[in-house]
Image (cartoon, grey):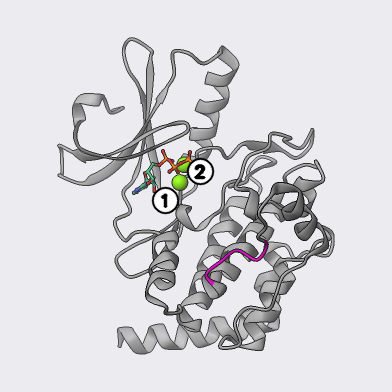
């Protein structure tokens, strides 16, 4: 049976973004905490409504341990608001961890950065996997949208703007995203594709090490220049050459040469790290 608004109790407002407000809710049936995102629906055009609903339907098909689960959507009786119901993540996010380090003058452990790399890659693999010729592009990858659970495992979330990409027809041209993480192809007004998500992941991993994005400038023009020539410094020397190598591969200015998810997973360095991580996890759970 489809759920209705009455099945939930609002606990508190978490925050608002440009497209709506997120609230922590409780499902009355079992007391489970969830989140819903309230978005204005009545003011959308018919085609926007259709697009949003089909986007949410696609997100609901993404069932993966490192992706925030999207459960349901409810449109209120007066057709003014849509409520998108999803998993609640209570472990904070990567942006919080990074700013904590900056404030306290500490760094994130290299093992933790590898764990994030591997779990984010596995989440993106699921998103980029074609379903009926469509891939889900995140489009807004940034530390604030990498949520963590209580065991510090990745939950990729806040797909708010992810657009469905029809591979056979066209590339989506809509520009979204944080300028610091914008890929060279987007700076050059080209289309967003899977490789742009890879670039953003490179920027996030870099920021987890350096505690600032790879490309910074006081104005957009200078920032764009740096991005397009790939002008950034090595991550701090406390991090290994292996990690530096992988991050530089993700930050490859040329789209064609930038690795895909499959390329990353097949990289000998990543395979080696993955095995090491498995051993650590097994030891911890023994
Ligand atoms: P914008 O989307 O405009 O860039 P935003 O991401 O801050 O901004 P929202 O997407 O509306 O705005 O999110 C509002 C708040 O809710 C943010 O603080 C976000 O971290 C939090 N949030 C979103 N999804 C979840 C979730 N599944 N669990 C816990 N908190 C969440
Ligand atoms: Mg967000
Ligand atoms: Mg958002």
The answer to whether residue 65 shows anywhere in this view is no
- Residue 206: assigned label: none
User: Is 201 on the left-hand or right-hand side of 223?
Assistant: left
What residue is at 54 percent from the left and 33 percent from the top?
Answer: 55
Frontmost residue, 166 versus 151? 151
Mark toward the viewer: 1 or 2: 2
Single out the residue that lies furthest toward the top: 78
Image coords of residue 241 (percent x, y): 66, 87
Q: Which residue is mark 1?
A: 68
What residue is at 83 percent from the left and 65 percent from the top?
Answer: 257
Asked if the residues shown at circle 1 and circle 2 are in contact, with their CB atoms under 8 angstroms apart, the answer is yes
User: Is 170 on the left-hand or right-hand side of 207?
Assistant: right
Q: On screen, 161 above or below 117?
A: above
What residue is at 51 percent from the left and 43 percent from the top?
Answer: 159
Frontmost residue, 47 versus 3? 47
Q: Quadrant of the N terminus?
A: top left
Q: Quadrant of the C terminus?
A: bottom left
* Range drawn in magenta: 211-215
- Tell me: is circle 1 under 8 Å from ligand 1: yes
Mark 1: secondary structure: loop
User: Is 122 on the left-hand or right-hand side of 184?
Assistant: left
Q: Which residue is mark 2?
A: 159
Q: On screen, 284 above or below 84?
A: below
Of the residues under marks 1 and 2, which one precedes in the sequence?
1
Bin the neighbour count of mark 2 within 10 Å (Cα to Cα): few under 14, some 14-19, many 20 and up: many
The answer to whether residue 171 shows anywhere in this view is yes
Image coords of residue 264 (percent x, y): 68, 70
């Amino acid at each position: 049976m489809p759920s209705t608004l009455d099945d939930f109790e609002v606990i508190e407002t978490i925050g608002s973004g440009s497209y709506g407000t997120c609230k922590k809710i409780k499902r009355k049936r079992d007391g489970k905490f969830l989140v819903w995102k309230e978005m204005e629906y009545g003011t959308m055009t018919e085609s926007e409504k259709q697009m949003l609903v089909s986007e949410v339907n696609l997100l609901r098909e993404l069932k993966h341990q490192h992706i925030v689960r999207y459960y349901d959507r409810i449109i209120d009786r007066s057709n003014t608001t849509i409520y998108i119901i999803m998993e609640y993540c209570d472990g904070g996010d990567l942006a919080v961890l990074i700013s904590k380090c900056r404030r306290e003058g500490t760094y994130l452990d290299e093992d933790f950065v590898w764990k994030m790399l591997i779990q984010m890659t596995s989440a993106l693999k699921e998103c980029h996997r074609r379903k009926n010729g469509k891939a889900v592009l995140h489009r807004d990858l940034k530390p604030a949208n990498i949520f963590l659970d209580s065991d510090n495992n990745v939950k990729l979330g806040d797909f708010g703007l992810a657009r469905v990409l029809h591979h056979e027809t066209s590339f989506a041209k809509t520009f979204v995203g944080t300028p610091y993480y914008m890929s060279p192809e987007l700076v050059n007004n080209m289309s967003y594709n899977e490789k742009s998500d890879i670039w953003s992941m490179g920027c996030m991993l870099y920021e987890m090490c350096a505690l600032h994005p790879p490309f910074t400038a006081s104005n957009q023009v200078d920032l764009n220049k740096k991005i397009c020539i790939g002008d950034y410094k090595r991550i701090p020397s406390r991090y290994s050459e292996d990690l530096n190598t992988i991050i530089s591969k993700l930050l490859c200015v040329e789209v064609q040469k930038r690795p895909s998810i499959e390329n990353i997973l097949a990289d000998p360095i990543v395979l080696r790290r993955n095995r090491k991580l498995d051993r650590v996890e097994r030891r911890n759970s023994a």
